[in-house]
Image: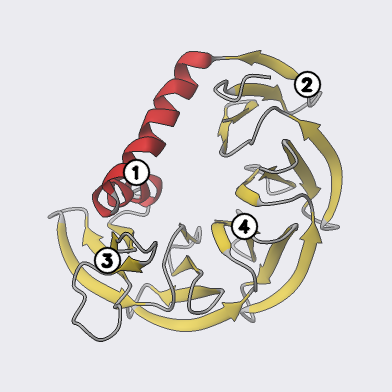
């Protein structure tokens, strides 16, 4: 199957309904823009993803990408990188705080109650940083190993799911204790994760296996594996369908 297609899959039958090349081309150009221009585009992408957490938006700052392949914060002081999460007041569009975090902050998710922010921070420490929204301080870090990529919080706010670029696992975090509950074996290079609105199913894209895994949220077991095409990257909800790129 052409890797530039976006697939629409029925959540009832797990069958591919139709591809749409037009949408995938836009997604591909967006990803290329991020690779080419680094921090600015990353800010825009992450902001779009979490701006619904009004009245504040949360932005991860990786920094500039140099020729050696390392990320440095744009406010690099000559000693150590100062990676942070910027907090934006959406009423004024002003940055009101910067929260220092470990490693290279990547994806970010806000819990439904609006009290916690979960940040994937690979690099210096393969952890999930938990930020207390009331204080804008890191209240806990959870070691998940590997290279955490993307995070998703279930609708109840009780679990956080984390994909891992360097393994076949997706990590499950208990938000009450901020501890690693379990690691579910799915497929090589897990990339994106979304949770069904009722919280019963989790969908994970596996780049190397060209599949998407469907996980039962109660048992934490893979119930279905769907072959979707070359190197599936993103997965999102659309009404009663699931779409992959």
| 144 in relation to 211, above or below | below
Whether pointer 3 and pointer 1 mark residues with C-beta atoms closer than 8 Å, the reply is no
Residue 78 percent location from the top left of the image: 20, 82
Residue shown at 62% from the left, 56% from the top: 154
Residue drawn 40% across and 38% down?
Answer: 31
Ranked by sequence position, the earlier of labels 3 and 4 is 3
Q: Position of residue 229 (x, y in %)?
A: 69, 27
- Secondary structure of the residue carrying numbered label 1: helix
Residues marked 3 and 2 touching at CB (< 8 Å): no
Residue 12 position, x and y percent, is: 78, 26
| Residue 105 occupies quadrant | bottom left
State the mark number for residue 34: 1
Residue reaching furthest to the front: 68
Dot 4 and dot 1 residues touching (CB under 8 Å): no
Disc with the residue nearer the chain's start (4 vs 1): 1
Going 50% across and 58% down the picture, which residue do you hit? 112
Horizontal side of 217 relative to 59 (left or right) equals right
Q: Is residue 77 left or right of residue 227?
A: left
Residue positioned most to the bottom: 79
Q: Which numbered disc flags the more N-terminal residue, 2 or 1?
A: 2
Badge 2 crowding class, 10 Å Cα cut-off, few under 14, some 14 to 19, many 20 or more, is: some
Is residue 34 or residue 152 the one in the foreground?
A: 34
Q: Which residue is mark 3?
A: 86
Residue at the disc numbered 2: 15
Identify the secondary structure beneath mark 2: loop
> Residue at position x 58%, y 33% from top?
237
In what element is the residue under mark 4? loop
Q: Tell me the distance, in whole angstroms, between the alpha carbons under discs 4 and 1.
A: 18 Å
Residue linked to disc 4: 165
């Amino acid at each position: 199957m052409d890797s530039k297609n976006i697939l629409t899959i029925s959540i009832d039958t797990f069958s591919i309904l139709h591809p749409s090349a037009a949408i995938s081309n836009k997604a591909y150009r967006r990803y290329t823009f991020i690779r080419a221009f680094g921090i600015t585009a990353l800010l825009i992408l992450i902001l779009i993803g979490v701006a619904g957490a009004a009245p504040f938006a949360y932005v991860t700052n990786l920094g500039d990408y140099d020729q050696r392949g390392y990320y440095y914060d744009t406010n690099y002081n000559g000693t150590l990188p100062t990676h942070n999460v910027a907090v934006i007041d959406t009423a004024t569009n002003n940055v009101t705080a910067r929260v220092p975090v470990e490693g290279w902050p990547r994806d970010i998710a806000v819990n439904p109650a609006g009290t916690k922010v979960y940040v994937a921070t690979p690099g210096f420490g393969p952890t999930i940083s938990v930020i207390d929204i009331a204080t804008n301080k890191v209240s806990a870090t959870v070691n998940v190993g590997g290279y955490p990529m993307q995070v998703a919080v279930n609708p109840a706010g009780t679990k956080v799911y984390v994909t891992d670029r360097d393994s076949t696992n997706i990590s499950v975090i208990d938000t009450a204790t901020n501890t690693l509950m379990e690691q579910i074996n799915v497929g090589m290079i897990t990339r994106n994760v979304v949770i069904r609105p009722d919280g019963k199913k989790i969908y994970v894209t596996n780049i190397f296996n060209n599949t998407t895994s469907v996980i039962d949220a109660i048992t934490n077991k893979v119930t279905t594996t769907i072959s979707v095409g070359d190197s599936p990257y993103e997965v999102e909800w659309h009404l009663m369908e699931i779409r992959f790129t």
